[in-house]
Structures are given as structure tokens and as C-alpha cells.
Amino acid sequence: MPKIELRNVTKVFDDDFTAVRDVSLVVKDREYATLLGPSGCGKTTLLRTIAGLVKPTSGDILIDGKSVVGVPPEDRNIGYLFQNYALFPHMNVRENVGYGPIVRGESKARTVRITDEMLRFVNLLEWARFMPSELSGGMQQRVALVRSLAAGCCKILFLDEPMSSLDPKIGVKLRYEIQKTARNLGLTVLHVTHDQEDAMSISDKVIVMRMGSVVQVGGPREIYNNPASPYVAHFIGESNFIKTVPVGDSSVAFDGSVITLGENVGGDNIVISIRPERILFEKRLENTLEGVVEDKNFLGPTTRFIVKIGSVKVSVSTAKHPEIKVGDKVYVYLPPSVLRVFRGVSDLDGELRILG
Ligand SMILES: Nc1ncnc2c1ncn2[C@@H]1O[C@H](COP(=O)(O)OP(=O)(O)OP(=O)(O)O)[C@@H](O)[C@H]1O
Ligand SMILES: [Mg+2]
């Protein structure tokens, strides 16, 4: 049975602004799901709606197979780490974590047990007597995380941008800790982020949003390798997009050459896309184009080249070929199996717009 199920959930604010549009999705028991999308696309609103802090305009929300629309937030058993979390500054770490259980009416002894267990999970038991101001940002974030867990003492955890206020290196470490903690506790997690790397690296399921709608749901690899639209291909990772016209069942024209695709073209307004790291500097019998290197940037693990092919510029990312210089003539090979085909894209620029 799905842990969380949404059926056609819509939220309209002030009668005229649709922040969440007809969202249907399932999060399974013990699944780690991320809600991924740019700022303002409705992630927090969707989370708050499931948690019961925002009333849906229409649609149904089920937890453990039962509708919870009308059930107050405290009875939904959801731990919630808010986007702008704050620890109580006048309480020490133990008091912060124990606040929820005490308010819920747990005994003193049980509260101590819950608090100890939670703090041990995030390696902060020896910091129990410290005040929040004495902790680093990363430590405070971990306290906030287990405080939200202890408050609900529940099997569902909502995290709204839990790494946003942290130094990126600490954020990366914390994301794996959170994932491990959730797995050890057998939690079902819905984690909001606008960082595609967060979503890719820790999720069982990625839910991609755009302007209030869910536009694709899938595992990280599926989303990355088979994006459902140019928007998803663009938002998650980097992609080159090329407008083309079909010249055969499974071939298109590009800069006077014929490009063979791994699938049938079909339809109008064809756009093909390819990830920069999938393009090879090689001359083969097919799908090889000639271009000139316009720009080159060393990024550490890879180097990014901008190659002009006819009137189109493509980005190529590779750790090989340090010898290639700006101004060089190069051959680029586009392997058919990694070319994505999008049909019916009449407004590519509109499709690629990240913000509403
Ligand atoms: N209470 C409200 N009343 C009116 N409009 C709202 C309300 N809450 C959110 N909105 C609007 O709904 C849209 C979605 O907001 P939301 O906070 O859900 O986005 P988000 O994806 O979480 O963005 P961010 O990544 O910036 O946190 C925004 O345009 C926002 O202004
Ligand atoms: Mg938000």
C-alpha cells in the first residue's frame, strides 16, 4: 500500500493563483522521494498541503490508504523540518529535541529515551547540554532534523530545503547522513530541494515540478537519461538542444548532414537533445560533424568546450583531449543511442524557461 497518495490535488490561492495544479502521485512505504523544481514552482505549498497546514482547493490526500483531508496536522503523524527552521535559542539541544514529545504528553523518562536515541543517530549526544548558538550551522541543522523527527515520532518525514543555509560541502555530507538516518529508522521521506544533485544522489524517486504541476516522476537515472520534456532535460543536468527537421524515418537534418537517431522521428517541431558529456571528439562513419572550438574552460574533473557547428553552438564536456585549443577544427560524434528526440516543441525557449 502506498504510504502517501495524492489524487488530483489542486491549491488555488486568493481565487486566482494556482500554486499546485492537479497533482497525482504515490510515495511508497520507506521510499526516499524528492520534490525537485525551481523557486516558486509550488514545492513548499504541496508539502504544506499534504501535512495539513494548507487546505487543498480540490483533490484527495491519502496516508496509509485513508483520506486525511479534514484531519488536523498534529493527527497526520508527519515530522516536518520547515524551510526556515529555527531552534529555540533559549533552550539547549536536549530541550529543543524533547520539546515535541513533552508537548505531546510523553512522560519525562520516555522523552529522555527518545531524545537520547535521536541525538545518537546524528552523533550529537555529547552536545546535549549545549545551546544552539554554540553549535556550527551543520550541527544546528542536524538538531533541527531530529527535533522534527522527535516531534512527530512518526514514520513520515517532510524536509523542506534542509541544506539551503549550509556551506555546500557540509550540505553534501549532511544529505547522505539524512538519507542514512531515514533508512535506519524506516522512514518514508518527502524532501524538497531545488538542487538537482541533491535529488539525484539520494532519491529512490524524483518528482519534478514546474509551475505547480508535476511534469515527471521516476528514478534518478530514468529522469536523467529519459527526460520527458526539454524542460526536464534542461533543468536536470545540462543539455544541448537542436531544432531539426526529419529527412527519414529515423534521421534528421543538421548543418547539411544527416543525423541518425536511435528511434523513429514522427511528428512535427522536432528538437533533439544531447548531454555535453555524451558528445565525443571523434570521426566516425556516421553522425560526425565538423566544427570550430570557440571557447574552452577547465573545470577540474572535466573541461567544457563550446564548439560552433554551422550556426549552432554545442557544449562538450570531457576529461580527455587537453590538447584541443580555441580555434581548432574538430570532429564531433553524436552517438545515436544517446540522442533524445522531442516532438511537438513549437516554443523551445518557452519550454526551457525555468522560472514561471
Ligand atoms: N499563502 C499564500 N498566498 C498566496 N500565494 C502564495 C501563498 N503561499 C505561496 N504562494 C505562492 O505560490 C507559489 C508557490 O510558492 P511555494 O512557496 O510553494 O514555492 P516553492 O517551490 O517552495 O519555492 P522556493 O523554492 O522559493 O521555496 C509562489 O508564487 C508563491 O508566491
Ligand atoms: Mg519553498
Image (cartoon, rainbow, N blue to C red):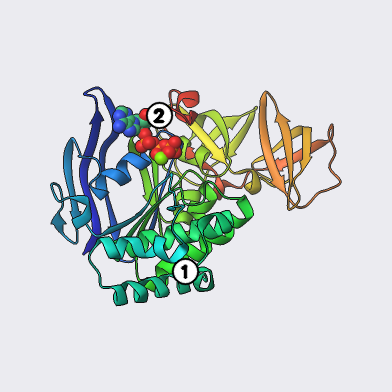
Mark whose residue sits in front, 2 or 1: 1
Q: Percent x, y for residue 237?
A: 56, 44
Q: Is residue 188 visible?
A: no
Which comes sooner in the sequence, label 2 or label 1? Answer: 1
Calculate the distance from the C-alpha at mark 2 to the C-alpha at mark 1.
42 Å
Looking at the rendered structure, the secondary structure element under dot 2 is loop
**Is residue 254 visible in the rendered structure shown here?**
yes
Q: Amino acid under label 1?
A: Lys
> Which residue does the numbered mark 2 point to in the structure image?
344
Question: Is 62 situated left or right of 163 in this image?
Answer: left
Q: Residue furthest front?
A: 90
Quarter of the displayed picture in which ligand 1 can be seen: top left
Classify mark 2 as within 8 Å of ligand 1 or not, answering yes or no.
Answer: no
Q: From the viewer's side, name the closer residue of 349 and 104.
A: 104
Instruction: Name the residue: 46% across, 45% down.
Output: 263
In percent of width and height, residue 312 lies at: 65, 27
Looking at the picture, does residue 226 appear above or below residue 22?
below
Numbered tag placed on residue 110 in the rendering: none
SS of the residue under disc 1:
helix
Q: Position of residue 313 (x, y in %)?
A: 67, 29
Q: How many marks?
A: 2
Q: Residues within 10 Å of mark 1 (few under 14, many from 20)?
A: some
When the figure is inspected, residue 59 is found, relative to residue 177, above or below; the finding is: above
Pick the quarter of the image with the C terminus: top left
Viewer-closest of 271 and 220: 220
Q: Residue at x 54, y 51 (%)?
A: 197
What is the three-letter code of the residue carrying label 2?
Answer: Gly
Q: Left or right of 120: which side holds 1?
A: left
- The residue labelled by disc 1 is 180
| Position of residue 46 measured from the top left corner of the image (x, y, whole percent) | 31, 42
Q: Quadrant of the N terminus?
A: bottom left
